[in-house]
Image: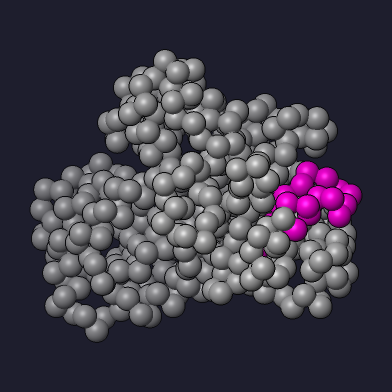
């Protein structure tokens, strides 16, 4: 089925089933508090209202009257609105958290009493970890995955399929990939397939800059910050050089660090760290930077079509973004922390992605090509020689076919991730 047909059907049905539903429902049976973070417009409120509208009262801290009541008299607020309750954008009323702790401690056997959401990971996580440690399940909802958009949820990931089955044919409509790269995974754009994606992302960035960055109070010049975001988009998929970036934009290194932190903790960018067998090295070596939504990256690059993606130098990095985020969403939607890295040697040999899943270590090369060839797996072979405990690797490509590339390395279409 063509991509546009799929999203028209989803628009008619309105609600899009999310893979995170199962972990959230399980958490509500196990914990008194569930906290769901994620970027603005990723579908947090829609998902939670779908699951809990019949059992929990919904209150948004975005509403000035509700927020003022909560801040002015938290105890009276919960007298008026006792649990079970769903509190949206809780970071705007952190005063409530200590009272939530007291209520939970008085009724520890009552599960799913409070459902909390927030769009700023650092602020919310820090406040919750200080107030509700041991009482809360922390989950993250990112924009829609390709699996969710195409209705292929709850399937095993490629590394969970026995290697002997990896060559089985599968119906992969590779043309569905290109609208996804251009538009991204934000639910509003999927539910409204005729909406102008460039205009939507432009408005989203403006709203994000005005609301979230103003509230964090670490950005004085919003115009300069948008130039900063465009400079990052031009470096998507590259090693992050803070000094070089600061010199180019006339910013001191500490400002660059602070702005990178803001974008990372509000889910706009991802810092992918290098893989070493010595785990301590992973935190101190230079990371690579990726935007978390391919549509946002396409907006900054002005991408309008499949042909545009294939002709631009940024096309490969855009496809890398989609693949890496698809795998990260897979783990997040299971309620698990993704353990993903890249591998690079001093001689510039590099594997785009290393996935740690339990004891398995899975190297993945990402190629903007519909015709995978054995040479595309050379860097994986170099890694296998260097790390003989790794047995299997994959090349993710844009075509429709699953093909063996020799040495336990398989070429896999994007849709099979």
Q: Position of residue 163 (x, y in %)?
A: 77, 75
Tell me the quadrant of the picture where the N terminus can be found.
bottom right
Describe residue 189's horizontal placement relative to residue 286 as left or right: right
Q: Position of residue 46 (x, y in %)?
A: 48, 57
Q: Position of residue 190 (x, y in %)?
A: 64, 48
Q: Position of residue 58 (x, y in %)?
A: 34, 60
Where does the magenta region start and end? Answer: 362-381
Q: Quadrant of residue 223?
A: top left
What's the residue at 35%, 69% (across, down)? 137
Describe residue 384's horizontal placement relative to residue 297 as left or right: right
Confirm whether the magenta stretch covers residue 350. Answer: no
Q: 167 above or below 75?
A: below
Q: Nearer the viewer, residue 204 or 218?
A: 218
Confirm whether the magenta stretch covers residue 372. Answer: yes
Q: Quadrant of residue 15?
A: bottom right
Q: Nearer the viewer, residue 351 or 58?
A: 351
């Amino acid at each position: 089925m063509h991509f546009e047909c799929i999203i028209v059907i989803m628009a008619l049905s309105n609600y899009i089933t999310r893979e995170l539903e199962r972990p959230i429902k399980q958490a509500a049976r196990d914990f008194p508090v569930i906290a769901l973070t994620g970027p603005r417009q990723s579908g947090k409120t829609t998902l939670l209202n779908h699951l809990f509208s019949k059992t929990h009262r919904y209150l948004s801290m975005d509403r000035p009257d509700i927020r003022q009541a909560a801040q002015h008299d938290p105890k009276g607020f919960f007298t008026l609105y006792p649990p079970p309750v769903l509190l949206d954008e809780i970071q705007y009323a952190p005063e409530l958290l200590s009272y939530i702790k007291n209520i939970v401690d008085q009724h520890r056997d009552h599960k799913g009493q409070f459902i909390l959401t927030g769009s700023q990971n650092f602020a919310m996580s820090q406040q919750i970890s200080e107030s509700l440690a041991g009482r809360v399940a922390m989950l993250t909802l990112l924009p829609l995955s390709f699996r969710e958009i195409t209705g292929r949820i709850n399937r095993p990931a490629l590394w969970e399929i026995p290697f002997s089955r990896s060559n089985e044919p599968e119906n992969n409509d590779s043309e569905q990939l290109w609208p996804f790269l251009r538009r991204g995974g934000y639910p509003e754009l999927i539910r409204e397939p005729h909406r102008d994606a460039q205009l939507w992302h432009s408005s989203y960035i403006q709203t994000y800059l005005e609301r979230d960055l103003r509230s964090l109070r670490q950005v004085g010049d919003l115009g300069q910050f948008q130039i900063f975001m465009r400079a990052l988009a031009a470096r998507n998929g590259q090693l992050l050089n803070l000094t070089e970036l600061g010199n180019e934009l006339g910013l001191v290194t500490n400002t660059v660090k602070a702005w990178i932190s803001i974008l990372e903790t509000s889910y706009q960018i991802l810092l992918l760290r290098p893989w070493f067998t010595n785990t301590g090295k992973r935190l101190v070596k230079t990371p690579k930077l990726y935007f978390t939504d391919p549509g946002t990256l396409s907006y900054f690059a002005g991408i309008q079509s499949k042909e545009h993606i294939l002709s631009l130098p940024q096309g490969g990095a855009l496809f890398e973004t989609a693949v890496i985020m698809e795998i990260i969403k897979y783990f997040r939607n299971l309620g698990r922390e993704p353990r993903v890295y890249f591998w690079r040697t001093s001689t510039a040999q590099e594997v785009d992605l290393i996935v740690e899943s339990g004891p398995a270590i899975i190297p993945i090369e990402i190629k903007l090509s519909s015709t995978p060839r054995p040479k595309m797996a050379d860097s994986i072979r170099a890694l296998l020689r260097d790390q003989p405990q790794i047995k299997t690797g994959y090349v993710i490509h844009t075509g429709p076919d699953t093909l063996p590339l020799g040495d336990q390395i398989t070429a896999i279409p994007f849709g099979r991730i």
